[in-house]
Image (tube, coloured by chain):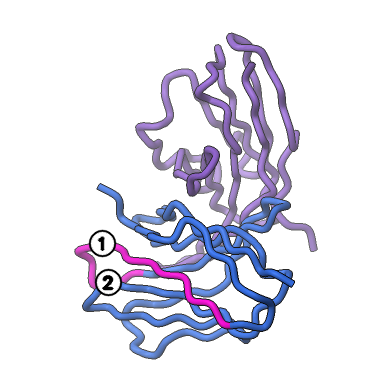
Chain colours: A purple, B blue
Amino acid sequence: DTGVSQDPRHKITKRGQNVTFRCDPISEHNRLYWYRQTLGQGPEFLTYFQNEAQLEKSRLLSDRFSAERPKGSFSTLEIQRTEQGDSAMYLCASSLLLAGGVFYNEQFFGPGTRLTVL
Amino acid sequence: AQTVTQSQPEMSVQEAETVTLSCTYDTSENNYYLFWYKQPPSRQMILVIRQEAYKQQNATENRFSVNFQKAAKSFSLKISDSQLGDTAMYFCAFLRDDKIIFGKGTRLHILP
């Protein structure tokens, strides 16, 4: 039984470069979430998908950020023209939303990708 | 406005002692979920315990229990017989519109 995996675990880049992170959710989980966690803070919601549809984006997600989940399985988060303020841990989570309007579906988190922008 | 407030940035207790982490939240909803998450130094977020607002009984998971005061919007976590492996960041969190809203966390150190 594999959990949520993220790749890479660490990324160091220079300001202005583009970076892409990947998240593989738990198999058959139809929902996938991205959060950002800066040092000393709790994670903040960025965006989430149900299958391949992106349902919501936070105002924290500037135009330089784009997320995709093309086949409803893995997801990528791309940051273009990185800035030093983008340095953070990017967390991915997945959950299984069952049909029938179940109110709560537990989110399982991955280990995160730590981004450092120099 | 901050929805989840954790007023204790850092705490230290001796192994085997009991420790209580505080959390208050703000919502106008009547039915919701509250959580405590643990994030060890390895950084993987783990769900410790959850509480459904419509249930009056406080949730318990082994050594972990909560004191849920709905009227006061308070949701504290009690860890009994603390162990070295409990050393971690603990986040109080609230589920709103399918998104988890986290507090800033409490760094807990269990001392040998």
Instruction: Sort mark 2 into few (<14), some (14-19) or many (20+) by Cα contacts within 10 Å.
Output: few
Q: Are marks 2 and 1 in contact (CB under 8 Å)?
A: yes
Q: Which residue is mark 2?
A: B73
- In the image, the segment drawn in magenta is B18-32
Labels 2 and 1 share a subunit: yes
Q: Amino acid at mark 1?
A: Asp
Q: Is residue A85 above or below residue A23?
A: above
The quarter of the image holding the N terminus of chain A is bottom right
Mark 2 or mark 1: whose residue is earlier in sequence? 1
Q: Is residue A1 magenta?
A: no
Q: Nearer the viewer, residue A84 or A66?
A: A84
User: Would residue B27 be found to the left or right of residue A9 on screen?
Assistant: left
Q: Secondary structure at mark 1?
A: loop
Instruction: Answer yes or no: is residue B80 visible.
Output: yes
Q: Main secondary structure of the magenta part?
A: loop
User: Residue B92 occupies which quadrant of the picture?
Assistant: bottom left
The quarter of the image holding the C terminus of chain A is top right
Q: Nearer the viewer, residue A8 or A117?
A: A117
Q: Percent x, y for residue A92?
A: 60, 45
Q: Is residue A74 above or below residue B58?
A: above
Q: Which residue is mark 1?
A: B26
Q: Is residue B1 above or below residue B74?
A: above
- How many numbered badges does the structure rendering display? 2
Q: Amino acid at mark 2?
A: Lys
Q: Percent x, y for residue A21?
A: 66, 31
User: Would residue A41 be found to the left or right of residue A103 on screen?
Assistant: right
Question: What residue is shown at x 62% (from left), y 20% (from top)?
Answer: A117
Q: In 3D space, how far apart are the residues under numbered discs 2 and 1 (Cα atoms)? A: 7 Å
Q: Is residue A61 above or below residue A95?
A: above
